């Protein structure tokens, strides 16, 4: 009875230690990434680079676990790992990076992020990453149990819960500094559990034969892994990791951004591990591989297939997102299901298995962050992912369904044809173009860097040349349009017409004084410059050098501007404005960086607006472009105006597509009471078929707190389709 209780308590100790370590692993990732996000321009690539660091550190932890478990005696394991736990616990008290690490805005973002993360959270994260393989190895050696892979599934449950609770339970209630302290306390609890597991395990290790089975079926002597097995232990998790990262990037930039898309994709990625590694009953290759093939074909060819079969398929952005997420889930399920099928059958290979798995996971992040970002001008890794998955799913289908070599060959030929069809439909290099009898389109420029993809297109109409135009895109979001006709090229269109909130504000400021000092945060195509007079001075703050190149090479707003001086200040606007001399004051500050789904939150916090206010003249104006299809930013900026004690108004303008004017929403804050009295707020109005107003939309949302660098949540302001 005593041994039974001791065995149960040991199982609970192992399970609790693994669960807590996994939970902390995936709590600290969004915590520390969000903490440093304001320092590196709020780019989505901060998340990708942070993911590269965490995957690489995870691999390093698995290397340590493999070497320690394979070559060290129980006494050495006990001494080394206990010491490491205690040192990491001491360093965990300072995981929040100090402000001295804040960059000036001109350094290499990737190297700076990797160095900062290494110093702040490197060793604690490393120790957490060693827990899974090392504790599972000890559990297997101490108890000779064959259910070790269920502990791996349990660790993924902990990771999954951490991802879900951070944005929806912890982030809306606590500041990041508070969460950092909570995490430190939880890490100390983990360190205590880790020391207990280490001491208990290394003193109770049994001398069982390392060839004992660790599967979930009968105990048999398994064959050692082959070279092909080891390659697949790397390749299959690499495919799953690439699916997670490529889907996140592709959907964000080519479908419709979702503010928490990376959490959704990472959660589904982990869920496939939980299902596949719980038990072999869940993964059935005979249906999983064909289902994956079917999903890829339907996703890539949904418009062409609907035309072939004579029905219309008008999917919303949300429905398209879920199609991509479902396909990603099936790809990861296939990769991780096949990975579980070829798991090692002998205990001696367990830590090596996890080591190679983590190496494959790191390869996915390395490929996207260091190779694809620098080599590709668009997100071509998505197309490569689909082709690689088709190859894998085809071979699995042929193996599961093909009774003879001829049947397997036929299935492979069919799958090869599907691969060619998908590549034709995806058209990653845009070879097919955009056929139209009314106009011709031409890609003028496309590039990609740390901050995303940018491009410039030109459209020329065959019968109406006066409507020819160029458009600048960041991802799929337009950030400027210009007519090509000489008599129309200086018209302010898109979100910036003269009767918009911005146009009214500039006209008022110009009537008030003969010379203006204007700051534009976010350059786009440079349309703001078209409002300048010969006596005005304009400063444009732009973080992405590719945007500057497009604005200068393909649009004339900057070159044709009448401003006496036009300065383009490269770097993050907030960091650059922090370094301005105290006597630098603007009459107007225009914030225009929030139209996409990946909003740079650090430009909308209390600390950011304190900087804007410091460099604003007493009667100056701050105009904020809050047009966004995914977030209601009105309550966020309204709270900032209230904190500063400034008056405010907003103006919504409906689209006039025949004039190239899009729906636009501007929010203006100022101490100038004359301006506020002259221009009352204009909310969005809903009209019936006769044009009568049936409802006016109040953009305010009560209960939205003031955003700070340490406290901001997207949950209350998310819009639904």
Image: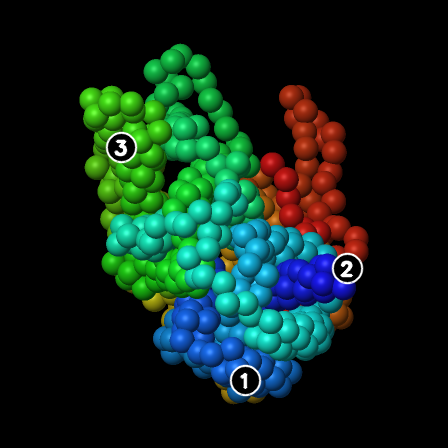
Quadrant assignment, res 690: top right
Separation (CA) of disc 2 from disc 3:
60 Å
Quadrant into which the C terminus falls: top right
**What residue is rendered at 34% in x and 15% in y?**
308
* Left or right placement of residue 174 versus residue 249 in this view: right
Classify 624 as above or below 518: above
> Quadrant of residue 169 in the image?
bottom right
Residue closest to the eye, 432 or 1: 1
- Name the residue tied to disc 2: 1
| C-alpha distance separating marks 3 and 1 | 54 Å
Query: Cα distance, mark 1 to mark 2?
Result: 31 Å
Q: Secondary structure at mark 3?
A: helix
Quadrant where the image shows the N terminus:
bottom right
Give the residue at mark 3.
419
Q: Which mark is residue 79?
A: 1
| Circle nearer the viewer, 2 or 3 | 2
Is residue 605 visible in the rendered image? The answer is no
Which mark sits nearer the N-terminus, 1 or 2?
2
Q: Position of residue 591 (x, y in %)?
A: 54, 63
Mark 3, other Cα within 10 Å: few <14 / some 14–19 / many ≥20: many
Q: Residue at x 64, y 73 (%)?
A: 200
Q: Identify which residue, 683 or 281, lies in the foreground.
A: 281
Element assignment for label 1: helix
Query: Along the polypeptide, which appears first: circle 2 or circle 3?
Result: 2
Mark 3 or 1: in front is 1
């Amino acid at each position: 009875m005593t041994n039974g209780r001791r065995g149960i308590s040991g199982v609970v100790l192992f399970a609790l230690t693994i669960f807590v370590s996994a939970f902390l692993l995936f709590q600290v990732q969004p915590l520390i990434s969000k903490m440093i996000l304001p320092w590196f321009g709020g780019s989505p690539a901060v998340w990708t680079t942070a993911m590269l660091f965490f995957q690489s550190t995870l691999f390093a932890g698995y290397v340590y676990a493999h070497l320690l478990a394979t070559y060290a005696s129980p006494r050495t394991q006990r001494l080394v790992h206990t010491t490491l736990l205690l040192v990491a616990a001491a360093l965990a008290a300072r995981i929040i990076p100090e402000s001295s690490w804040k960059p000036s805005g001109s350094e290499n973002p990737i190297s700076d992020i990797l160095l900062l993360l290494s110093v702040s959270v490197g060793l604690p994260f490393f120790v957490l990453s060693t827990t899974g393989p090392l504790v599972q190895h000890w559990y297997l050696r101490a108890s000779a149990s064959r259910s070790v892979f269920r502990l791996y599934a349990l660790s993924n449950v902990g990771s999954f819960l951490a991802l879900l609770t951070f944005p929806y339970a912890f982030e809306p209630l606590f500041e990041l500094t508070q969460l950092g302290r909570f995490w430190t306390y939880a890490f100390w609890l983990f360190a205590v559990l880790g020391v207990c597991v280490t001491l208990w395990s290394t003193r109770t290790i049994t001398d069982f034969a390392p060839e004992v089975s660790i599967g979930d079926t009968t105990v048999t002597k398994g064959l050692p892994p082959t070279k092909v097995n080891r390659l697949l232990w790397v390749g299959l998790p690499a495919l799953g990791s690439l699916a997670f990262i490529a889907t996140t990037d592709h959907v964000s930039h080519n479908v419709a951004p979702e503010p928490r898309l990376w959490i959704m994709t990472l959660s589904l990625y982990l869920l496939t591990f939980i299902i596949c590694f719980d038990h072999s009953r869940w993964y059935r290759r005979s249906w999983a591989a064909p289902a994956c093939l079917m999903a890829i074909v339907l996703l890539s060819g949904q418009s062409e297939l609907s035309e072939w079969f004579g029905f219309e398929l008008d999917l919303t952005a949300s429905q398209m997102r879920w199609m991509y997420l479902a396909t990603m889930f099936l790809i990861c399920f296939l990769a991780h299901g096949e990975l579980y099928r070829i798991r090692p059958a002998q205990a001696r290979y367990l830590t090596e298995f996890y080591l190679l798995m983590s190496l494959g996971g790191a390869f996915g992040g390395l490929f996207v962050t260091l190779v694809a970002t620098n080599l590709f001008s668009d997100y071509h890794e998505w197309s490569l992912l689909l082709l690689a998955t088709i190859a894998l799913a085809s071979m699995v289908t042929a193996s599961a369904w093909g009774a003879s070599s001829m049947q397997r060959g036929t299935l492979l030929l069919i799958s090869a044809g599907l691969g060619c069809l998908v590549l034709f439909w995806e058209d990653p290099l845009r070879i097919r173009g955009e056929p139209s009898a009314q106009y011709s389109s031409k890609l003028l420029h496309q590039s990609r860097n740390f901050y995303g993809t940018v491009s410039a297109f030109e459209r020329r109409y065959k019968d109406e040349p006066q409507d020819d135009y160029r458009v600048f895109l960041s991802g799929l979001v337009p950030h400027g349009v210009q007519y090509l006709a000489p008599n129309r090229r200086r018209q302010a269109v898109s979100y910036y017409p003269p009767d918009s909130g911005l146009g009214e504000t500039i006209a008022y400021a110009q009537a008030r004084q003969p010379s203006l000092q204007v700051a534009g945060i976010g350059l786009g195509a440079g349309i703001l410059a078209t409002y300048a007079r010969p006596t005005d001075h304009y400063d444009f703050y732009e973080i992405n050098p590719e945007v500057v190149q497009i604005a200068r090479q393909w649009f004339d707003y900057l070159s044709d501007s009448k401003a006496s001086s036009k300065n383009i200040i490269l770097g993050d606007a907030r960091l650059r404005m922090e370094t301005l001399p105290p006597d630098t004051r603007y009459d107007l500050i225009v914030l225009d960086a929030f139209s996409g789904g990946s909003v740079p939150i650090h430009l909308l916090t209390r600390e950011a607006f304190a900087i804007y206010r410091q460099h604003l003249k007493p009667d100056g104006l701050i105009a904020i472009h809050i047009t966004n299809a995914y977030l209601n930013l009105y309550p966020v900026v309204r709270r900032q105006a209230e904190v500063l004690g400034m008056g405010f108004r907003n103006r919504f303008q409906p689209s006039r597509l025949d004039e190239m004017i899009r729906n636009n929403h501007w929010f203006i804050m100022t101490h100038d009471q004359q301006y506020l009295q002259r221009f009352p707020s204009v909310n969005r109005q809903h009209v019936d078929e006769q044009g009568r107003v049936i409802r006016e939309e109040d953009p305010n949302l009560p209960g939205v707190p003031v955003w700070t660098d340490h406290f901001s949540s997207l949950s209350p302001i998310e819009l639904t389709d």
